[in-house]
Every structure is written in structure tokens, then in C-alpha cells.
Image (spheres, grey):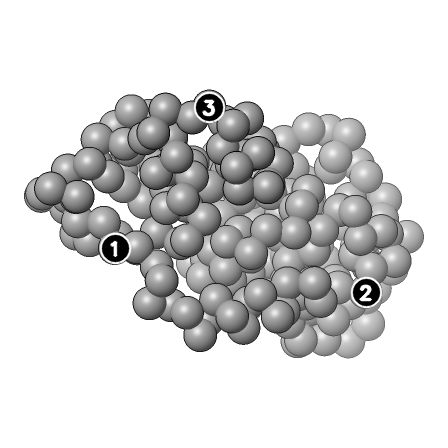
Amino acid sequence: MTAADARVLVAATYPAVRNGIRVLLEDSGFDVCVEAADAESAAAAASRERPQLCAIHAALRGGSLEAVARIKLRVPATAAVLISATADLDELIDALRAGASGYVVETAGAGAIARAFHAVHRGEAALPAELLAALGDELRARGLRRRVTVAGRSPVDLTRRQSEALELLRQGLSTTDIATRLRISPVTVRRHLGIAMEKLSANDRAAAVRALEQSQG
């Protein structure tokens, strides 16, 4: 099966981002059959159009990982690729857990992104080379994950970065200060905290901190 046989769904919140992904994929021989601006509409469009590939931007409204999980639930045969602004190990792991077959970084360039989609279309996994060693280390150190148990809820596991960001938030650090301390971008900090909040069923950061404190007893 060639790229020309592959119908692709493109999901990104902003029209300019969707257009950029569309042009890149179409120039690489793929057929972009539908676009979506949020997780819910992406899942609905995937159910309706049954694309072979889904290009999901990490900043998608409603949650990119939620979109991947919903799409894989409704259309198991489709292959999802997460397109992220930065190479983030926790995000990569969460994307794989959600059912993604590939993870690419915007700054890798059009050629690298196109090659990743071609690889996934061939049935291969596409992961950034710069994260492979770290991924191996993380898999060997699963015991470093932090289990948080809150009364009335099932225990949840936070990744090292999610736990670190939440702990620094508990100490009163701002997003910018946490980013400086962990040597990551503020956008990545917000993503870690957002995923931690979702795992803890917390409506806001304060609720997530309370859940952490309750777990600590």
C-alpha cells in the first residue's frame, strides 16, 4: 500500500496549524480526507471517515491523548501519530499508552515528519531517536513512578516529571520557576500538571496539590 492509498485525519486546534500539517502530508503523497479542531470532533470524524492515519497535534483542544484514546477505541485499525512542539519523554510514554503508533517533534523538519508518517503507514513505530535511550532508562526504572492514593479513589501512578512538577507546585513555585528548576519549557510544565490533574480527577491545581498532600498522609 502506498501513501496515496492512505487517507489521513488531521486534528489541531488552530487553522494555521492544521493547514501546515495538511500541506506537509499532501506534499508527501498522503490524502488528507478530514480535519478536526478538538478531541471530540476528531473522534467523531474518525468514526465517520475511517482514515488509515490520524495526525494529532499535541496542543489539541480537549486533549490530544484523549483524542488518540477515543479514536483507537472507535477505529482500532487506524494509526495515530502525535505531533508535539518539544521532545518530551513523559508525553511520549503517555501517547504510547493511549494507543499512538508514532510521536514526532515539529522542529524535526518536514522531511523527518514525513518519514515518520510513512513508517507508521508501513506498520512500524516512529519515535524520536533522541528519546529512545531515555525511554529505555524509564522502562527500566518503572519503580521510580510515584503512586498516589487518595481516599475514595483508585491509586494512580504519576511519572517522575509529573510528580516533580506537582511537588514543586505544592512548594509554591510558579510555572516559570518550575520550568527553570526542571530545565524544561513552561508549556511542558503545564502539560505535566494538566495530565497529573486528569489522573487525580482534580478540577484545578489546588485540588491536585490537596490530593498529593492527602496521599502523603
Instruction: Tell me which amino acid carries mark 3.
Output: Ser
Q: Nearer the viewer, mark 2 or mark 1?
A: 1
Instruction: Tell me which amino acid carries mark 1.
Output: Arg
Q: CA distance from mark 2 to mark 1?
A: 37 Å
How many numbered badges does the structure rendering display?
3
Q: Earlier in the sequence, mark 3 or mark 1?
A: 1
The numbered disc on residue 147 is: 1
Work out which quarter of the rendered image holds the C terminus and state it: top left
Q: Residues within 10 Å of mark 2 (few under 14, many from 20)?
A: some
Q: Secondary structure at mark 1?
A: strand
Outermost residue on the right side: it is 27
Instruction: Tell me which amino acid carries mark 2.
Output: Arg
Q: Position of residue 106 (x, y in %)?
A: 75, 46
Q: Earlier in the sequence, mark 2 or mark 3?
A: 2
- 123 or 189: nearer the viewer: 189
Q: Considering only vertical position in the picture, is 13 above or below 159? A: above
Residue sitting at x 55%, y 67%: 135
Q: Position of residue 41 (x, y in %)?
A: 53, 37
Compared across the picture, whether 87 is left or right of 42 comes to: right
Work out which quarter of the rendered image holds the N terminus and state it: bottom right
Q: Position of residue 142 (x, y in %)?
A: 38, 68
Mark 3 sits on what residue?
Answer: 174
Q: Secondary structure at mark 2?
A: helix
Q: Nearer the viewer, mark 2 or mark 3?
A: 3
Task: Report which quarter residue 124 is drawn in.
Answer: bottom right
Q: Position of residue 4 (x, y in %)?
A: 83, 64
Q: Considering only vertical position in the picture, is 90 above or below 121? A: above
- 181 or 4: nearer the viewer: 181
The numbered disc on residue 127 is: none
Contact flag, marks 2 and 1 (Cβ < 8 Å): no
Mark 2 sits on what residue?
Answer: 115
- 188 or 200: nearer the viewer: 188
